[in-house]
Structure formats: C-alpha cells, structure tokens
Amino acid sequence: MPKRILQGTVTSDANDQTITVSVERRFTHPVLKKTVRKSKKYRAHDAQNAFKKGDSVRIIECAPKSKTKRWEVIAQ
C-alpha cells in the first residue's frame, strides 16, 4: 500500500523536532451540492527544525515516531 502524501501549512513549531501541520480538504456536499472546507491537524517529525509557522510543507506517512507523530516532513 502506498504512503499518503499531504500538503498543508505549519501552524505551530513550538516543540523540538515536531511541527503541527493543518491540512485543508475541499469536497462537494452530497445533498446540498455546496463546496465544503474541512481541516485537520497532523503532528509531523521535522528533524532539523527547518520549518517555521506559516510555511507550506508536504508530509508523508511513516512508522510511529512517538505517541502522536505518524508523519514526517518531505525535504523541499
């Protein structure tokens, strides 16, 4: 099974080697036929502490690194 790759914006870089990434997805509501925006936050591993709040990043699935981290940043 291929690993998922998501793109989002860094919302927090307060922790060491960890960033919080907000990923937004858009879809059409099945009944209302209206475009709906939903966002979800993921915690990702950033080994070099290279990314700061507001940066656009891509993250990829990985084996669990801690209790909450299952994603890591792809070097851009």
Image: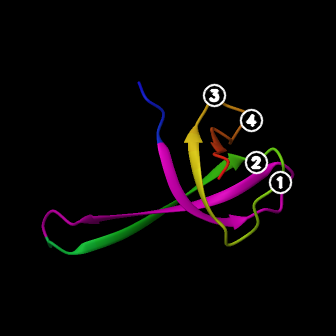
Mark 4 is on which residue type? Ser
Label 2 with label 1: CB-CB less than 8 Å: yes
Mark 1 is on which residue type? Asn
Q: Is residue 9 toward the left or the right of residue 31 in the image?
A: right
> Secondary structure under badge 3?
loop
Label 2 neighbour load within 10 Å: few <14, some 14-19, many 20+? many
Q: Position of residue 65 (x, y in %)?
A: 73, 33
Look at mark 2 in the image and give the residue it sits on.
46
Label 4 with label 1: CB-CB less than 8 Å: no
Q: Nearer the viewer, mark 3 or mark 2?
A: 2
Q: Which of marks 3 and 2 is nearer the N terminus?
A: 2
Look at mark 3 in the image and give the residue it sits on.
63
Q: Nearer the viewer, residue 27 or 60?
A: 60
The magenta stretch is 5-31
Q: Distance between the residues labelled 3 and 2?
A: 14 Å
Question: Label for residue 35?
Answer: none
Look at mark 4 in the image and give the residue it sits on.
66
Identify whether 65 is placed above or below 48.
above
Q: Work out which residue is located at the far right of the displayed protein and give it.
A: 16
Q: Work out which residue is located at the far front of the displayed protein and give it.
A: 76
Q: Nearer the viewer, mark 4 or mark 1?
A: 1
